Amino acid sequence: MLETISWPSRRRSAASRETALSRSGTADFEIIDANEAHLPGIVAIFNHAVRETFSIWSETETTVELRRAWMAARRQAGFPVIVAVDRLHPGDVLGYGSFGVFRDFPGYVKTVEHSVYVSPNAQRRGIGRAALDELIVRARAQGLAAMVGGIDSENAGSIALHEKAGFEVQGKLKGVGRKFGKSLDLVFMVKSL
């Protein structure tokens, strides 16, 4: 039986907001908290990853309604949902990220698992790194101890991104996933905060 953990309130500080903007300072995008208007963009990025990649180990696309419930649950638990938006067209979602419960047992209360996804037409612009850096800042501000990323073993770009951000490979689980009829290996990368 899983035990429900009561997570402390995690609100973003003014300093964290300023940090996110300054990190993406001269870029053509900025990292902000997601809101209702960003949901269609989040859904488009998620569904592309479902259809075209092994980044999300599901063959079922999502909907705005399902992502709305997901975002509400994350926020209710005190976890961030962020988006990278185009500075000139703030309604254009270029990427998104979040973190949440790693495992639902009290011993893991200081560890979170994160995810970052970037639109295929916005990759190689520093968006993934900026979103990951913002999640790290927020996790530290919440007093968390470790951040985990579960990455498809063939996703060399994501593994390299995480290594540059100070994550270390802590293990590889062979054959634990399936998608499009293919057996998949999962790499766990961890960053101590």
Image (cartoon, rainbow, N blue to C red):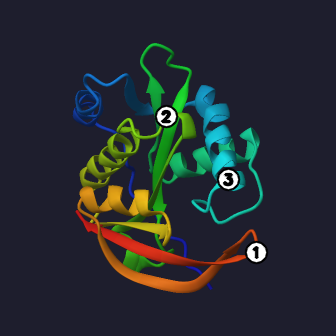
Q: Say which label, 2 or 1, has the lower sequence index.
A: 2
Label 1 crowd (10 A; few <14 / some 14-19 / many >=20): few
Q: Tell me the amino acid under the disc marked 3.
A: Glu
Q: Tell me the amino acid under the disc marked 1.
A: Gly
**Residue at label 1?**
181
- Camera-side residue of 164 and 111: 164
- Residue visible at 55% across and 24% down in the picture: 92
The Cα–Cα distance between marks 2 and 3, rounded to whole angstroms, is 15 Å
- Residue visible at 59% across and 45% down in the picture: 71
- Residue visible at 77% across and 58% down in the picture: 60
Residue 34 visible? The answer is no
The Cα–Cα distance between marks 1 and 3, rounded to whole angstroms, is 14 Å
Query: Could you say where residue 97 lies in the image, as x and y percent from the top left?
Result: 47, 47
Look at the numbered disc 3 and give the secondary structure of its residue: helix
**Residue at label 2?**
122
| Residue 108 located left or right of residue 68 | left
Q: Is residue 56 above or below residue 5?
A: above
Quarter of image, res 128: top left
Q: Say which label, 2 or 3, has the lower sequence index.
A: 3
Look at the numbered disc 1 and give the secondary structure of its residue: loop
Residue 52 is marked as 3
The Cα–Cα distance between marks 2 and 1, rounded to whole angstroms, is 29 Å
Q: Quadrant of the C terminus?
A: bottom left
Label 3 crowd (10 A; few <14 / some 14-19 / many >=20): few
| Residue 61 located left or right of residue 46 | right
